[in-house]
Image (tube, rainbow, N blue to C red):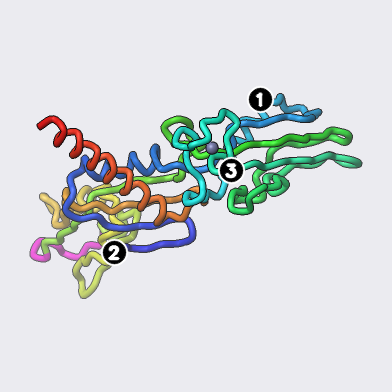
């Protein structure tokens, strides 16, 4: 692991093909289940937003996801269209503007289960003028990103090849052009020679190569195509580690299913 903060993680995977790295990226984006509002029962809506628009906005609010207590509706034993406690979580909203117009924020959604609630309290849902009112019940369920982007657990998931920079010290005359031109400021000059300070931050834009007065350039940008630097940023619904772990589990499950089918053919 290279680094982590509350919502994102950076790590290195070694010894895999680009196809594997991409499979992991796609599993993370489209197949790790998360909670999102899917059904809305509008009891009263005198706001200027149509019911459909209001429901759509509610669906896009990221909800904290408890993957250990809930199952996908298609995997649930209840087989009920309305769902049960294992495949559905209810939230309600009751909001009114009295004297002044005001915004309704995600923080006003009351969650039946405190583990399934908006990850942020400050997402605007609607604006109400005096006298306008919204009353509704919303039902969240687990879903996957390939069905609708509202179930995507990440706002960003990507990777790059592991960068590898080499400076030919015999050719480098320390003119500093590459140091100045690098947009990531990963190069430095020491004792009149260019050195690579933060290789991992290189985006392989090759500005350094282009601006080197030596022909061919004294600095070379290369990469290792069996090693990848991954960056995953969660929307807050799951921890970034859990998102990666679930993505890897999905790949493992697919591989084992394939293995079983091949074994059955023999
Ligand atoms: Zn159920």
Seen at 18% across and 49% down, the residue is 16
Residue 152 image position (x, y, % from top left):
46, 40
* Mark 3 or 1, closer to the camera: 3
Query: Depth check: 235 or 203 in front?
Result: 235
Give the CA distance from mark 2 to mark 1: 50 Å
Image position of 238 with respect to 265: above or below: below
Residue 105 image position (x, y, % from top left):
71, 44
Residue hosting label 1: 52
Asked where in the image residue 202 lies, by quadrant, the reply is bottom left
Residue 57 image position (x, y, % from top left):
63, 34
The magenta stretch is 169-177
Element type at mark 1: helix
Ligand 1 within 8 Å of disc 2? The answer is no
- Mark 2 burial class by Cα count in 10 Å: few <14, some 14-19, many 20+: few
Element type at mark 2: loop
Residue hosting label 3: 85
Ligand 1 within 8 Å of disc 3? The answer is yes
Q: Considering only order in the chain, which callout, 1 or 2, is on the residue closer to the N terminus? A: 1
- Mark 3 burial class by Cα count in 10 Å: few <14, some 14-19, many 20+: few
Q: Considering only order in the chain, which callout, 2 or 3, is on the residue closer to the N terminus? A: 3
Residue hosting label 2: 198
């Amino acid at each position: 692991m290279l680094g982590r903060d509350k919502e994102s993680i950076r790590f290195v995977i070694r010894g895999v093909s680009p196809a594997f790295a991409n499979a992991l990226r796609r599993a993370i984006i489209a197949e790790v289940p998360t909670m999102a509002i899917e059904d809305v029962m509008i009891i009263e809506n005198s706001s200027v937003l149509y019911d459909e628009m209001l429901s759509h906005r509610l669906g896009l609010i990221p909800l904290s996801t408890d993957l250990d207590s809930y199952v996908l509706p298609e995997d649930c034993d209840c087989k009920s269209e309305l769902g049960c406690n294992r495949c559905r979580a209810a939230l309600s909203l009751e909001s009114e503007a009295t004297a002044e117009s005001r915004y309704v924020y995600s923080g006003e959604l009351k969650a039946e289960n405190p583990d399934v609630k908006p990850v942020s309290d400050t997402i605007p849902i609607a604006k109400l003028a005096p006298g306008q009112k919204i009353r509704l019940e919303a039902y969240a369920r687990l879903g996957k990103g390939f069905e609708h982007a509202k179930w995507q657990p990440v706002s960003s998931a990507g990777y790059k090849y592991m960068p590898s920079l080499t400076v030919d010290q015999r050719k480098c005359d320390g003119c500093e052009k590459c140091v100045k031109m690098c947009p990531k400021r990963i190069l430095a000059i020491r004792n009149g020679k260019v050195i690579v300070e933060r290789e991992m931050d290189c985006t392989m834009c090759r500005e350094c190569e282009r601006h080197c007065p030596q022909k061919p350039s004294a600095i070379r940008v290369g990469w290792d195509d069996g090693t990848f630097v991954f960056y995953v940023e969660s929307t807050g619904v799951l921890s970034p580690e859990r998102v990666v772990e679930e993505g890897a589990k999905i790949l493992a499950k697919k591989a084992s299913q394939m293995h079983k089918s091949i074994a059955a053919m023999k």
